């Protein structure tokens, strides 16, 4: 019961954020990257959230920021899910040595801690928002592949698939006709889990200043820009930080409930 | 009697050795992967050197030769491996100093932070996890469970900023080393508490425990230990996993708190394109990761006789 | 069972009182260690080989130089050299050295020691990043006799004395240079200055201790020997942590405090804010003269006029930083160029004149089917990322589509520059001689990031470097400055000011002519 309630709240919160970030630009007339007033005005003098250190309206930066983070997180998660599912599927139906090779490669990649792997990719491609998305998306592929493969292997050993195989169905058709559809529920939970990680990863990399352009309002970048003013204007970092945490928590909850 | 008890021991030994072998292979594959990512996708190291203020092209050519960069990539890989087996990780492009030496200098700081963070994290995780499952019917348990999942979701960076904010509000100054330790510890305690909660709830439903709880608290605490024992193997492997990820966690913590350490060294090397340092650190991280996993697996085997039977 | 008397209130009070008494005793005692916060952990600390300005903060007091510059007048004064003479053709500099100077390791300082220093610096295997370039067309150093040093140049080079006055050409013990070599000398530095180099742990700390035998200081130092026994330098690379470090009482003095924090601290009783102007180039962006659309002078002028430097400077630096007037800072290069004013209507008119207008009504100007796109690259340090965001906002207002990239490091910046995909790119160097302009504006200059090719400018800069006659030099640099402004080669924003904040328990803080380097010898505790 409690779980269901949590799920409702989580989905509600995420939908709310999506709605706000879609409708936000329609509601707000203020550009998030243009300075409009003196810097660091308090929320009282310039409602609702004051201005940031460069005199930009902080409320519109937060609204646009949620959108940037959600979009970037979804794109990265899409890369992970597509790449990981196809690799996992390939590994689970192909001949033993290909499976072995893929697993070896994945284990090797997993031996490099995720953040370091993403940093390594960023280093190779140079800073930029696209780089951050690609680095997180590809950085999460190995872990996802391993888990997806485990799900597929479980499905593969079920009776109807053994039956299909004995009837002489080709591996590719088994993969798409039987294994993929039957692993779908597990995969959805896995995808949600990785979405929460990609949100976390994206905001960490942008927090470290790797997004290239800090005028792009993205929550991790806002968190980084705000922390210098933690004493005088704590809301500049506390608000984006709280939104990130709740976003990750909600997606995490959804993944839990799907499991 | 002797041969019977000996056979499983030998089997365990073989199992352990095999685990060591795959671990070694994995670490080796990881450093190979890094080598080729850095060299093939990354920027030309000589560009990085030119950025230092070397002006003439002759100087650049000379450097390219000195560093062996005029050789084909496979030859470079071979000589890197040859150096590695002699404990030579190469030299930084910037400081010209041995990478191993730079790493050893910074190692102390990260080890100090990571170890104390791990201890705080384990203690916090146990406390949260056990209280969440022990009082799971009451609001204390619900609170602990919510806190545990919240802590899993809060980015380290944000936690660090919140810690700095709170410490700026307190009148007495908190020593510099304590905050990063607590922050790192908290990020570990979240996942750990969730793991304990997931496993412990099941075993606490067992009739023995229910009966014990009905009889008295002192007795039931002893039983709690019995309920905890089966979850030691997954707990150990989680600790191993966390220990390995600490390396990454310290990157952010060290940045937020401006502490020296391997994480800062790594970020700096990556930003400046100092590839020998990056390569050395990733190799170290991979070794550390596989090492801690092997130890966790071994401990798990020692703790759980059922695993022995299975394998 | 423990006895209960611990909890007696009176006893508790007594313990607190005792504690207060003891701690007040301690604080009334004069501390002997000064804690100095540095802002950048240099990748190398050898001033002869590495280039960072930060390394000079401690090392300026570890070394003495042949000559020094007066912090206010800029006049050259004796230090290790008691007197000097420049040959009429400007190619031979002869120095009479002091006889009474010893290095911290006990070795005597003489002409042979000085020669060893120059040899070490120009040795091509050592890849000196700054010092060897500061010597210009250097040919060789000779020890004429024990205390007479001669520097021979291939051609006249006016900035030489200025170079010799800087820590990068400070005199090190030849024995130490020889013993440790180029990679390890940075950890074992030995000079003749008022402080001894004790320890350097990268990214963590540098420790200096008073050199008690010091007695040959130049007249710009007030004290004969250092007043403070020991100085401990620690690093605060993250700007957000610097004010914290002061407030937590981790440091006594720190530089490059972010403007908002500096202003806030200056209002508190225990701190003083000391804005120190840094001579050299202003925070500036080079406009690419060979790539469309900034190859058009009208476009460059429009981009310069469309940026509200006064508002940008006020937003980011408060009232603590002067608006830049030209290619060099107003202090000490009193410039005659007027303060640039923002003029958006003029900027728009210039763009229209250049043929850019919004024909497809998408909010972005276009010409012949090309969108008005500007690639802006900014360095990651200091306030550059903030400034770049506001420049971007202003250019977007003019109808440009601006792609901003903050480089990851200096090498990242160099790399983006070498890819040549930019219209505006930020970089500025510091220096006390106007010859600083040469590598940036001469056709063949290493930092000619405007990619300007102008014979007129080349000639002016070459004559400025070759003539020792001060009025002639100044005239050449003034003309060069006017040319740079007319051609809109740069977008100058503000002159650099280092915001130092210190506890009031520290006094007598003086800085060298270069602005960055404190005279540690004169620092004292107590007001």
Image (tube, rainbow, N blue to C red):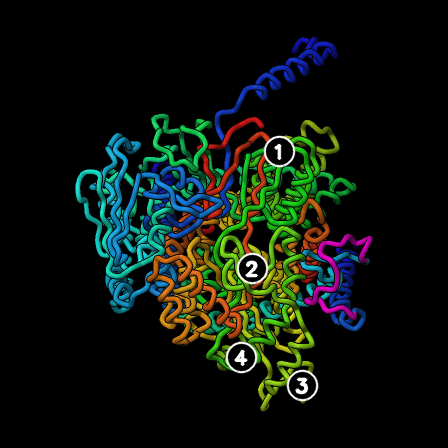
Q: Residues within 10 Å of mark 3 (few under 14, many from 20)?
A: some
Mark 1 lies on residue = B174
Looking at this rendering, what residue extends furthest in the left direction? C145
Subunit ID for the residue under disc 2: C
Q: Earlier in the sequence, mark 3 or mark 4?
A: 4
Say which quadrant the N terminus of chain B sits in: top left
The Cα atoms of the two marked residues, 1 and 4, are separated by 57 Å
Are dots 3 and 4 on a single chain? yes
Q: Secondary structure at mark 2?
A: helix
Are dots 1 and 4 on a single chain? no
The Cα atoms of the two marked residues, 2 and 3, are separated by 30 Å
Whether residue A33 appears in magenta in the rendering, the answer is yes
Residue C37 in sight in this render: yes
Q: Nearer the viewer, residue B193 or C69?
A: C69
Res. C442 image quadrant: bottom left
Q: Earlier in the sequence, mark 4 or mark 2?
A: 4
Mark 4 lies on residue = C297
Whether residue C228 appears in magenta in the rendering, the answer is no
Subunit ID for the residue under disc 4: C
Q: Nearer the viewer, residue A86 or C356?
A: C356
Mark 3 lies on residue = C358
The Cα atoms of the two marked residues, 1 and 3, are separated by 58 Å
């Amino acid at each position: 019961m409690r779980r269901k309630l949590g799920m409702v709240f989580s989905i509600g919160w995420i939908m709310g954020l999506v709605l706000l970030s879609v409708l936000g630009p329609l509601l707000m007339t203020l550009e998030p990257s243009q300075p409009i007033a003196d810097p660091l005005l308090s929320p009282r003098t310039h409602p609702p959230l004051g201005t940031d250190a460069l005199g930009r309206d902080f409320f519109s930066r937060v609204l646009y920021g949620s959108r940037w983070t959600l979009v970037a997180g979804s794109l990265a998660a899409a890369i992970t899910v597509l790449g990981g599912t196809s690799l996992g599927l390939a590994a689970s139906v192909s001949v033993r040595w290909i499976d072995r090779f893929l697993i070896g490669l994945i284990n090797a990649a997993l031996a490099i801690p995720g953040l370091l792997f993403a940093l390594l990719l960023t280093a190779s491609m140079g800073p930029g928002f696209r780089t951050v998305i690609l680095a997180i998306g590809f950085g999460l592929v190995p872990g996802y592949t391993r888990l997806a493969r485990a799900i597929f292997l479980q499905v593969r050993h079920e009776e109807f698939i053994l039956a299909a195989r004995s009837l002489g169905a080709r591996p590719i058709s088994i993969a798409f006709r039987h294994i993929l559809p039957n692993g779908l529920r597990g995969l959805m939970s896995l995808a949600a889990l990785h979405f929460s990680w990609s949100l976390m990863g994206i905001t960490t990399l942008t927090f470290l200043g790797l997004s290239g352009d800090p005028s792009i309002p993205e929550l991790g970048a806002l968190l980084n820009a705000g922390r210098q003013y933690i004493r005088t204007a704590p809301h500049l970092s506390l608000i984006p930080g709280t939104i990130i945490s709740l976003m990750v928590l909600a997606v995490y909850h959804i993944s839990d409930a799907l499991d | 009697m002797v041969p019977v008890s000996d056979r499983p021991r030998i089997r365990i030994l073989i199992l352990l050795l095999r685990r060591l072998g795959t671990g070694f292979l994995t670490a080796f594959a990881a450093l190979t992967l890094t080598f080729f990512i850095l060299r093939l996708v990354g920027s030309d190291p000589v560009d990085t050197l030119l950025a230092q203020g070397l002006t003439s092209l002759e100087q650049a050519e000379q450097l390219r030769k000195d560093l062996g960069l005029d050789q084909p990539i496979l030859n470079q890989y071979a000589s890197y491996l040859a150096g590695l087996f002699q404990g030579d990780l190469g030299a930084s492009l910037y400081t010209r100093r041995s990478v191993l030496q730079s790493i050893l200098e910074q190692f102390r700081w990260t080890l100090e932070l990571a170890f104390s963070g791990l201890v705080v994290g384990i203690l916090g995780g146990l406390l949260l996890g056990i209280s969440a499952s022990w009082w799971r019917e009451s609001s204390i348990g619900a609170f602990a469970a919510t806190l545990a999942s919240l802590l899993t979701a809060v980015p380290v960076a944000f936690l660090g900023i919140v810690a700095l904010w709170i410490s700026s509000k307190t009148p007495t100054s908190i020593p510099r080393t304590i905050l990063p330790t607590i922050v790192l510890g908290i990020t570990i305690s979240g996942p750990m508490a969730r793991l304990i909660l997931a496993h412990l709830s099941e075993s606490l439903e067992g009739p023995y425990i229910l009966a014990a709880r009905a009889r008295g608290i002192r007795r039931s605490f002893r039983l709690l230990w019995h309920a905890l024992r089966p979850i030691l193997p997954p707990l150990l492997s989680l600790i191993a996993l966390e220990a390995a990820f600490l390396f990454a966690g310290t990157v952010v913590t060290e940045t937020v708190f401006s502490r020296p350490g391997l994480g800062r060294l790594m970020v700096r090397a990556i930003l400046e394109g100092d590839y020998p340092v990056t390569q050395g650190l990733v190799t170290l991280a991979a070794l550390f990761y596989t090492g801690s996993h092997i130890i966790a697996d071994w401990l798990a085997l020692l703790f759980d006789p059922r695993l022995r039977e299975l394998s | 069972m423990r006895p209960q008397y611990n909890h007696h209130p009176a006893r508790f009070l007594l313990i607190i009182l005792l504690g207060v008494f003891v701690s007040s005793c301690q604080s009334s005692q004069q501390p002997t260690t000064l804690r100095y916060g540095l802002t950048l952990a240099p990748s190398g600390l050898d001033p002869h080989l590495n280039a960072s300005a930060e390394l000079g903060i401690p090392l300026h007091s570890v070394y003495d130089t042949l000559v020094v510059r007066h912090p206010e007048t800029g006049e050259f004064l004796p230090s290790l050299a008691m007197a000097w003479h420049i040959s009429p053709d400007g190619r031979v500099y002869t120095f009479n050295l002091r006889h009474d100077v010893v290095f911290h390791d006990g070795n005597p300082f003489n002409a042979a020691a000085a020669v060893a220093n120059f040899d070490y610096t120009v040795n091509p295997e050592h890849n000196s990043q700054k010092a060897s370039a500061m010597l210009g067309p250097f040919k060789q150093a000779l020890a004429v006799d024990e205390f007479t040093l001669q520097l021979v140049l291939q051609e006249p080079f006016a900035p030489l004395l200025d170079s010799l006055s800087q820590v990068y050409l400070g005199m090190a013990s030849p024995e130490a240079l020889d013993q440790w070599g180029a990679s390890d000398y940075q950890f074992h530095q030995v000079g003749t200055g008022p402080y001894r180099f004790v320890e350097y742990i990268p990214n963590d700390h540098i420790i200096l201790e008073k050199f008690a035998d010091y007695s040959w200081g130049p007249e710009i130092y007030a004290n004969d020997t250092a007043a403070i026994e020991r100085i401990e330098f620690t690093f605060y690379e993250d700007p957000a942590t610097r004010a914290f470090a002061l407030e937590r009482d981790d440091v006594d003095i720190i530089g490059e405090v972010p403007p908002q924090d500096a202003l806030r601290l200056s209002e508190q009783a225990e701190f003083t804010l000391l804005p120190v102007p840094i001579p050299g180039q202003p925070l500036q962006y080079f406009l690419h003269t060979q790539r469309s659309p900034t190859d058009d002078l009208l476009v460059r002028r429009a981009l310069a006029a469309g940026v509200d430097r006064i508002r940008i400077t006020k937003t980011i630096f408060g009232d603590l930083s002067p608006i830049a007037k030209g290619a060099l800072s107003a202090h000490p290069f009193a410039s005659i160029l007027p303060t640039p004013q923002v003029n958006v209507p003029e900027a728009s008119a210039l763009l229209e004149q250049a043929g850019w207008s919004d024909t497809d009504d998408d909010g972005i100007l276009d010409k012949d089917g090309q969108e008005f796109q500007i690639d802006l690259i900014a360095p990651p340090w200091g306030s550059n990322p903030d400034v770049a965001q506001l420049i971007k906002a202003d250019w977007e207002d003019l109808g440009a589509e601006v792609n901003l990239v903050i480089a990851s490091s200096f090498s990242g910046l160099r790399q983006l520059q070498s890819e040549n995909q930019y219209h505006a790119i930020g970089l500025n160097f510091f220096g006390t001689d106007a010859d600083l302009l040469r590598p940036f504006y001469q056709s063949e200059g290493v930092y000619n990031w405007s990619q300007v090719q102008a014979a007129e400018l080349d000639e002016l800069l070459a004559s400025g470097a070759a003539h020792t006659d001060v009025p002639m030099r100044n005239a050449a640099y003034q003309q060069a400055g006017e040319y740079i402004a007319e051609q809109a080669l740069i977008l100058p924003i503000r002159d650099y000011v280092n915001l130092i904040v210190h506890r009031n328990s520290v006094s007598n803080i003086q800085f060298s002519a270069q602005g960055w380097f404190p005279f540690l010898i004169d620092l004292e505790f107590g007001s």
